[in-house]
Image (cartoon, rainbow, N blue to C red):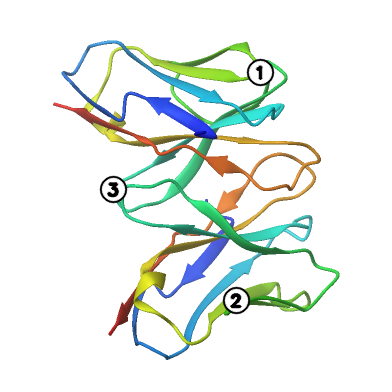
Amino acid sequence: DTAVSQTPKYLVTQMGNDKSIKCEQNLGHDTMYWYKQDSKKFLKIMFSYNNKELIINETVPNRFSPKSPDKAHLNLHINSLELGDSAVYFCASSQPPQGSEQYFGPGTRLTVT
Amino acid sequence: QQQVKQSPQSLIVQKGGISIINCAYENTAFDYFPWYQQFPGKGPALLIAIRPDVSEKKEGRFTISFNKSAKQFSLHIMDSQPGDSATYFCAASSNDYKLSFGAGTTVTVRA
């Protein structure tokens, strides 16, 4: 009965490759997010979708492209991977109103070599 | 720039002691202040949250103190237990969906 799930859990790839991370939530939430946690554990929001519509797009290289096929899924595609993309990426979801609890997935550890 | 400043970066406390983590913010539009707990290899999970209309909120051994005029809030963990060893993040948001997180505090509770 996993609430927010991500695949894969670990991703090791070489510079220049393209990769995707998938996220699914079974909570019935309307809003989903992608966060990046760097090696110092700092958490920064990247994107947010509400009912499949992009509502937050932080200063993220355009090599990162989110896609929400339906409100239960939010995928993250990364083109031309760079060493600095190595991090843990977390998907999260919440239900309006704004300022409500966000439920995080287990994270995907991306290592770019 | 970081909108929520958190300190200390880490702390060690003996079992049964009190852990105190402090956060400060500048954006007066913030109206929701949650604390998240993260164990190694896991995603953050909501621990406790407060809105600025109250100065304190307590849930079990965890208490948030909120000082609106000073734009500061803190988390107190009473009777700290080894199972409380984790990284704690304060956060804040305004009338949008964006949570701004502090840098995190790694708490180690020694038995």
Per the image, label 1 sits on a secondary structure element best described as loop
Residue B58, labelled with which disc?
Answer: none
Q: CA distance from mark 2 to mark 1?
A: 35 Å
Q: CA distance from mark 1 to mark 3?
A: 30 Å
The image quadrant of residue A85 is top left
Q: Is residue A64 above or below residue A35?
A: above
Which of the numbered marks, if any, corresponds to residue B74?
A: 2
Residue closer to the observer: A6 or A47: A6
Q: Which mark is residue A39?
A: 3
- Judge depth for marks 1 and 3 and give the one in front: 1
The disc labelled 3 sits on which kind of residue? Answer: Ser
Work out whether residue B84 can be spotted: yes
Q: Amino acid at mark 2?
A: Ser
| In this rendering, position of residue B29 left or right of residue A66 | right
Q: Is residue B38 left or right of residue A74?
A: left
User: Few, some or many C-alpha atoms within 10 Å of disc 2 (few <14, some 14-19, many ≥20)?
Assistant: many
- Identify the residue under disc 1: A71
- In the rendered image, the residue lying farthest to the right is B53
